[in-house]
Image: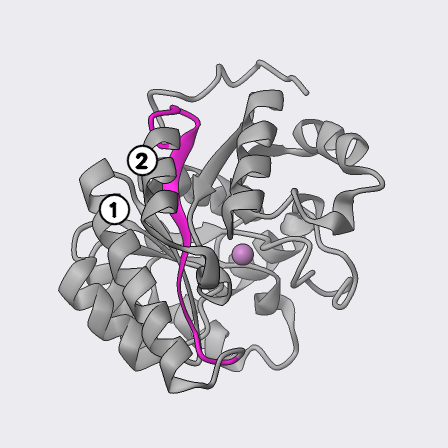
Amino acid sequence: MIFDTHAHYDDEAFSEDREELIGKLNENGIRYVVNIGTCRETCVQTLRLTEKYPFFFGAIGFHPSDIAGFNENEERWFREQAKNEKIIAIGEIGLDYYWDKEEEVQEKQREAFVSQLKLARQLKLPVAVHSREAAKDTMDIIKEHGQGLGGVIHCYSYHVQDALAYVEMGYYIGVGGVLTFKNARKLREVVEAVPIERIVLETDCPYLAPEPYRGKRNSSLYLPYVVEKLAEIKGLTPSEVEDITFKNAVDMYRISHVMNPVNAISG
Ligand code: NI
């Protein structure tokens, strides 16, 4: 059984066949999905998905590329929504200097990141962190404001040394389709160095489909390709990788108390 710790099924890429696709997940071994919000609108859609599908959980937060709309009002709204037991994390939050190069915008990103880390601490929720071309600032901010919060550095793209530092601070490393790419040497090194007990599976769908579907729309149904690669690198069987990363996801999101009975298939 597979746990997809990071997906965006609210995305318009799924408009045509969302229900049909989600209806197929359980029977194809995808046991749980965490849908991740990126702004107010996608957080509302995330809430709807968790209401509709018993095996969906949600994270709410403002993505660094969407922080223009983040303010005290939104924080209040988050506080309210976080009482919902299907909302299990704050995310995705973080820094993205790839899309935003201006210092002023980057400063705003850092402020929103810090205030959402503080919010997560108050709410006692783990975080889903997005970080792109912002290795040093992300590390500095997490060291100062994110120690012991728990959660995941999603779609991990930095060096081994930082990965081990995050693990040391209580974080998990999110690994998805990129691991199957031919140029994934850096991520491969990370996966070799980080204990399997600290790795979680994710799609980030509709983005980052694994080989042989690279460039196409991604979905949780393609996670077995990532499992296979991970198993090969770690010298484990695919089913061992599924079991261990499943447990990791449950521990990371601290949801053993709200999980559905394993045999309750629903849609
Ligand atoms: Ni994402």
Ligand 1 appears in which quadrant? bottom right
Amino acid type assigned to the residue bearing label 2 in the image: Arg
Please provide the residue range marked out in magenta. Answer: 82-98
Which residue bears the numbered disc 1?
A: 119
Coloring scheme used: one colour
User: Is 249 positioned to the left or the right of 233 in the image?
Assistant: left
Percent x, y for residue 247? 39, 37
Q: Which of marks 1 and 2 is nearer the N terminus?
A: 2
Which residue is pictured at 51% across the width and 80% down the height?
A: 98
Q: Distance between the residues labelled 1 and 2?
A: 8 Å
Q: Quadrant of the N terminus?
A: top right
Percent x, y for residue 41? 57, 44
Which residue is pictured at 20% across the width and 45% down the height?
A: 121
Which sits in the foreground, 63 or 26? 63
How crowded is the residue under tag 1: few (<14 C-alpha within 10 Å), some, or many (20+)? some
Magenta stretch: includes residue 187: no
Which residue bears the numbered disc 2?
A: 79
User: Is 14 positioned to the left or the right of 230 in the image?
Assistant: right
Amino acid type assigned to the residue bearing label 1 in the image: Leu
Tell me how many marks there are.
2
